[in-house]
Amino acid sequence: MDICIKSGSPDKQRTACVIVGVYEARKLSFAAALIDRAANGYLSDVLKCGDMEGKLGSTLLLHAVPNTLCDRVMLVGLGKELEFQAKEYREVIRASVKSLAKTSASEAVSYLSEITIKKHNVEWMIEQATVATLDVMYRFDRFKSKIDDSLCALRKLTLTVSRRTDLAVGVKGLARGLAIASGMRFAKDMGNLPGNICTPTYLAESAREMATQLGAEAEILGESEIRALGMGAFLSVSQGSDEPPYLIVLKHYGAKDKQVRPVVLIGKGITFDTGGISLKPGEAMDEMKFDMCGAAAVLGAFRAVAEMKLPINLVAIVPACENMPSGHAIKPGDIVTSMSGQTIEILDTDAEGRLILCDALTYAERFTPAAVIDVATLTGACIVALGHVLSGLFSNHDALARELLEAGEVVGDRAWHMPLNEEYHEQLQSPFADMVNFGGRPAGSITAACFLSRYAKAYDWAHLDIAGTATRTGKDKGATGRPVPLLVQFLQARANPALAKVVRRKSG
Ligand code: BES
Ligand code: MG
Ligand code: ZN
């Protein structure tokens, strides 16, 4: 779908549909008032009938509005004017696009992007509207043998800015929104693909192809190289599977200097998690094809950053493998040695995410990173704690945690700061090795993060547990593309030369 920017009067738009907002208490937005004036009070009369109260996200489609050049006018409820903020804005954009997609209009001009919100500029308004629109329009129908084209005719949406002088920043916001949406689409596609197609090999090939397209560097390490690095924890997970593992490394050098310390993103890339010998129950096991959503989000964020040509150095690392039961699989009680040299007693083969991530965290040290953020569908316990609303955020550095929370806030992809107190480490004690990989049910997402923290001592580190936020279940089952928006916003803030401190690599 095409999205464009323009400015102009709503009654003068020759289009299939003009979209304008109405606050509660039937108060017309500025654009709606312009149409109302041209139409001699037609909108006010309609509102008096009581069919549109201005409730947040409600819509009403009007045809043949007098003295306009459009086929339809869509009224969208904005809720209470004083409560209209970023969250409400995203919600009305989504509601308008959902409603528009049900009509036969193939194009529309939306004036919702002209509404002003405290603390947010035109660039942000357009960026957020673009992301929300493309998110709503996303379909995954690759495996449907018949696609019903009549389902949605919408091909083009024009977002307006109130002044001609705002067009240039509008276009900048559009470019950013398109890049974020493209990263989210990549993440959703990868997540939604079934495990028999999205294997570690497929993930590696897709990452390589993407890097080539973007002019970024890709390094894909195979099993023998992974073994040579001493990644015993990573390999212990993959050993039960017939699919070969890969360590995917992508590099974007956007900063002035290649020597500027990069941000490293690490994504959990379990292309299917059966639990291994500690086999999961059958119910909803299909959803374990989503266990590579951390990898997908990291690659998606990488894509957005490279498309935007952000002036930042960024490395994406994805350990990719399957977790399967077999005669070769790792067993409870087995002890493995991680790349860091720390030994791990594997009590539960279903706690595999931390095993592949710990070696990736050690590998990240070679980049002398400015910060490392790992993203993983790590624990069911995180869903119990935060549901599908907030991602769990853990960090060994409060300032980094604050940056990530703030980034999530700005783009409506929020996280919650969780604790990593020393006391939780007691649950990881092993009588036989340096630690166990499973600390029992209590505080499951915290002990998983504590485990990871033991491999992230060399740098500022944060961990996002996205077990709940990466997917939707039920009738809308599918990948959400989160936390691509949070990650891109964080990197954007870091890349801003006015804010970013240029810290050079240590020599040697
Ligand atoms: N991939 C799962 C976590 C998960 C569960 C993600 C449900 C999304 C939805 C992870 O590998 C896992 O199995 N975790 C176990 C950990 C336990 C054995 C310590 C869990 O959450 O039960
Ligand atoms: Mg598991
Ligand atoms: Zn898993």
Image (cartoon, rainbow, N blue to C red):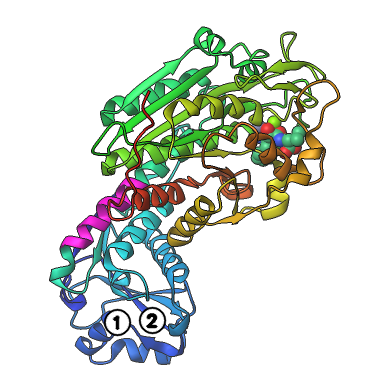
Q: Label 1 to label 2, Cα distance in Å?
A: 7 Å
Q: Which of the 4 image quadrants contains residue 417?
A: bottom right
Please give the name of the residue rendered at 30% of the width and 52% of the height, measured from the top-left corner.
Answer: 496
Residue 117 at what x, y percent from top left? 36, 75
Give the SS element for disc 2: strand
Q: Nearer the viewer, residue 162 or 497?
A: 497
170 magenta-colored: yes
* Rendered position, 165 above or below 285: below
Please give the name of the residue rendered at 55% of the width and 30% of the height, measured from the top-left corner.
Answer: 361
Q: Which residue is mark 2?
A: 22
In this rendering, position of residue 391 left or right of residue 1: right
Q: Which residue is mark 1?
A: 32
Please give the name of the residue rendered at 23% of the width and 87% of the height, measured from the top-left corner.
Answer: 39
Give the SS element for disc 1: helix
91 magenta-colored: no
Q: Tag 1: Cα neighbours inside 10 Å, few (<14), some, or many (≥20)?
A: many
Q: Nearer the viewer, residue 22 or 182?
A: 182
Q: Nearer the N terminus, badge 1 or badge 2?
A: 2
Q: Which of the 4 image quadrants contains residue 90?
A: bottom left
Q: Give the magenta part as a residue range.
A: 168-180
In this rendering, position of residue 8 left or right of residue 117: left
